[in-house]
Amino acid sequence: MNLKNNYHYTLITPLMIIIAFLGLTFRENGKKHFYVPIGIIGVYLVAEKEYHRKTNRAEILNKIKNFSRK
């Protein structure tokens, strides 16, 4: 993934969560269900990014450990 896409990814995800929160908070009851999928996708993207960051760090740490043993 190039650098330009990372900026879009980091800006759109919190925006999705904010839109969902505001929609659920301020819209009338009949139209609130339209904002639930946006919120779910936003939370999923944040969790996915954190999971991948954690696994990538673990892989890098293992590579450093293996390199230092040689």
Image (spheres, rainbow, N blue to C red):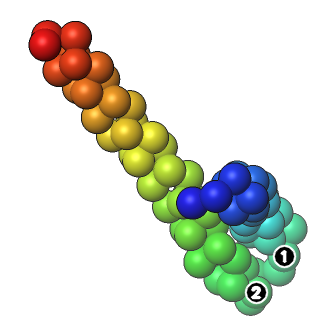
Determine the residue located farthest toward the left in the rendered image.
Answer: 70
What crowding class fits label 1: few (fewer than 14 Cα within 10 Å), some (14-19), or many (20 or more)? Answer: few
**Disc 2/disc 1 C-alpha distance (Å):** 6 Å
The kind of residue tagged 2 is Lys
Determine the residue located farthest toward the front in the rendered image.
Answer: 70
Question: Quadrant of residue 38 in the image?
Answer: bottom right
Percent position of residue 47, x then y: 47, 51
The kind of residue tagged 1 is Arg
Percent position of residue 51, x then y: 40, 45
Percent position of residue 6, x then y: 67, 55
Question: Quadrant of residue 60 in the image?
Answer: top left
Determine the residue located farthest toward the right in the rendered image.
Answer: 26
Q: Residue at x 57, y 60 (%)?
A: 1
What crowding class fits label 2: few (fewer than 14 Cα within 10 Å), some (14-19), or many (20 or more)? Answer: few
Out of 30 and 52, give the one closest to the viewer.
52
Residue located beneath label 2 in the image: 31
Residue located beneath label 1 in the image: 27
Decide: marks 2, 1 in contact (CB < 8 A)? yes
Out of 8 and 36, give the one closest to the viewer.
8
